[in-house]
Image (spheres, helix red, strand yellow):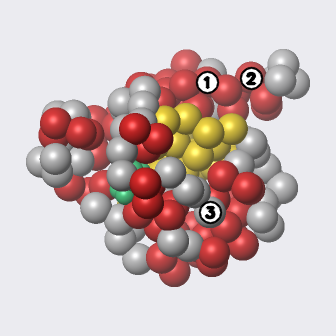
Amino acid sequence: DTVLVLNGPNLNLLGRRQPEIYGSATLADVEELCRTTAAEFGLRAECRQSNAEHVLIEAIHEFRVGTAGIVINAGAYTHTSVAILDALNTCEVPVIECHISNVHRREAFRHHSYISAAATAVLAGFGIHGYALAIRHLAHLRAGEG
Ligand code: DQA
């Protein structure tokens, strides 16, 4: 079974982008963590990143049924994109929204997420470990353990 780990705009620069907020781990480190964590639970992590909204939407369409779920960090599209919300609302699999930083202690414009309304669960402020927690939870859901 596959888990889609979908990272949005500017997350390709992880490790170099505002490390005081997002830490020093790179996107490659995040993807490695996701693959390792998924494998621990007998899952496979398919990791994608794009700065383009339509590419993120097309990835959601590709994985919306028949997978173990989607972990999405939509970056700034979290706070702007009804289109990504609509795409996530088509999903028949669980969706976990993940943010590296605690968006609620940052600027007011980061406090609202369009995509939370389509999310099974939301993580913020766990650093890159949030991705591992999200995958772990998808594995539990897959096993029917809630
Ligand atoms: C982010 C938080 C967003 O507000 C921001 O635009 C990002 C990253 C996070 O992972 O903390 O790009 O989603």
Query: How far apart are the two marked residues, 2 and 3, measured between alpha carbons?
Result: 26 Å
Q: Residue furthest right?
A: 144
Question: Which mark's residue is nearer the viewer, 2 or 3?
Answer: 3
Label 3 neighbour load within 10 Å: few <14, some 14-19, many 20+: some
Q: Nearer the viewer, residue 72 or 48?
A: 72
Q: Residue at x 79, y 31 (%)?
A: 142
Query: Percent from the top left, x then y, of residue 90?
Result: 79, 67
Q: Secondary structure at mark 2?
A: helix
- In the displayed structure image, the side of residue 90 where residue 136 appears, left or right: left
**Residue identifier under label 1:** 136
Q: Amino acid at mark 2?
A: His
The amino acid at mark 1 is Arg
Which numbered tag is attached to residue 67?
Answer: none
The answer to whether residue 99 is visible is: yes
Pointer 2 or 3: first along the chain = 3
Q: CA distance from mark 3 to mark 1?
A: 24 Å
Tags 2 and 1 in contact by the CB under 8 Å rule? yes
On screen, residue 65 above or below 25 = below
The residue tagged 2 is 140
Q: Residue furthest left?
A: 16
Can you say which quadrant of the picture contains the N terminus? top right
